[in-house]
Amino acid sequence: MSTSAEQSSPDAAPSPARPGGVQSLGRAFEILEKMADAGGTVGLSQLATDVGLPLPTIHRLVRTLVDLGYVRQERSRRYTLGPKLIRLGETSSRMLRTWAQPYLTQLVDSVGESANLAMLDHDEIVYVGQVQSQHSMRMFTEVGRRVHPHCTAVGKAILALESETRVRGLLSRTGMEAHTVHTITDPDVFLAELARVRAQGYAVDDGEQEIGVRCVAVVVPDAPAPVALSVSGPSGRMTTELVTGAAPLLRDAAVRFSRDLRTGTAARA
């Protein structure tokens, strides 16, 4: 695929110029992101509409991505994200954990309880990083563990930024299983909980995933993926005072971590 051919193609829709940028490369990544937004599978016509480019242009770009292994064409003639992206995703997840490590460590030092990094992957929350507290009784969450968002503070923090339609769709797919007697299992009650999260600026899981465990979380603003930071510990130590005191520390860490992700420069405490 020739960059100059893409730029001079008569059927190519104009796109904002980026100093020093390569137009075809930018379009290719936009296609991958739109496919991810669609759940990983999309038809060519819908993709052309979503990206805002003529069908012939989209077809050329997608065929190049197929040839490279980053997109795959199914028998239905729809396109899916390709297997070659798996290695990139796994590596980037490990890097995300590495980048978050200083911020998690600072939270543990400040709050005294375990700090976690989690992200929304399709309809599930996956834990991608943790720094444990020094207490003999402490919370341990295995990196890679997957849970449903409705019963976790990190899930609530992330979903609080989503539209009601998207939240209801996710809840209908996951089923809102009751993990404890405290788990919210009613979509309307959960949506009211998300409104509370937005108002106070942080989310709390009060024994909803596991009895005797309390967690407070905030979303990482402007992150390239839905990501949240949290602090968790036994309910006896995670008092109301500790939770309200931890919330601003979490928000500060989240802002600095977000800046780090955008600029590549670690923010200092």
Image: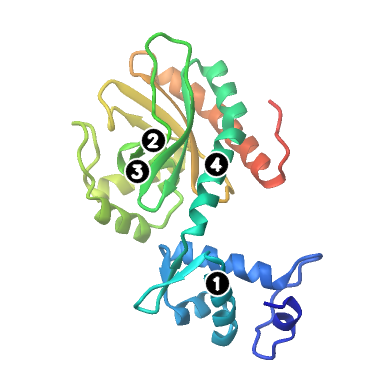
Please, what secondary structure does the residue beneath circle 4 have? loop
From the viewer's perspective, is residue 248 above or below residue 166?
above
Outermost residue to the right: 20
Toward the viewer: 171 or 40?
40
| Dot in front, 4 or 1 | 1
Q: Which mark is residue 67?
A: 1
Q: Residue 149 carries which label?
A: 3
Give the labeled residue for mark 2.
153
Between the C-alphas of marks 2 and 4, the distance is 13 Å
Looking at marks 4 and 3 on the same chain, the residue that comes earlier in the sequence is marked by 3
Number of marks? 4
Q: Are marks 2 and 4 in contact (CB under 8 Å)?
A: no
Instruction: Provide residue 87's location: percent of width, then percent of height.
Output: 52, 50
Q: Are marks 1 and 2 in contact (CB under 8 Å)?
A: no
Q: In which quarter of the image is residue 104?
A: top right
Toward the viewer: 12 or 65?
65
Between the C-alphas of marks 4 and 3, the distance is 16 Å
Instruction: Provide residue 172's location: percent of width, then percent of height.
Output: 25, 56
* CA neighbours of label 2 inside 10 A, class few (<14), some (14 to 19), many (20+): many
Seen at 71% across and 42% down, the residue is: 264
Instruction: Provide residue 117's location: percent of width, then percent of height.
Output: 49, 34
Toward the viewer: 73 or 105?
73
Looking at marks 3 and 1 on the same chain, the residue that comes earlier in the sequence is marked by 1
Seen at 76% across and 67% down, the residue is: 18
Seen at 41% across and 68% down, the residue is: 41
Toward the viewer: 54 or 184?
54
Please, what secondary structure does the residue beneath circle 3 have? helix
Amino acid on which disc 2 is placed: Ala
Between the C-alphas of marks 3 and 1, the distance is 36 Å
Amino acid on which disc 3 is placed: Pro
Looking at marks 1 and 2 on the same chain, the residue that comes earlier in the sequence is marked by 1
Outermost residue to the bottom: 10
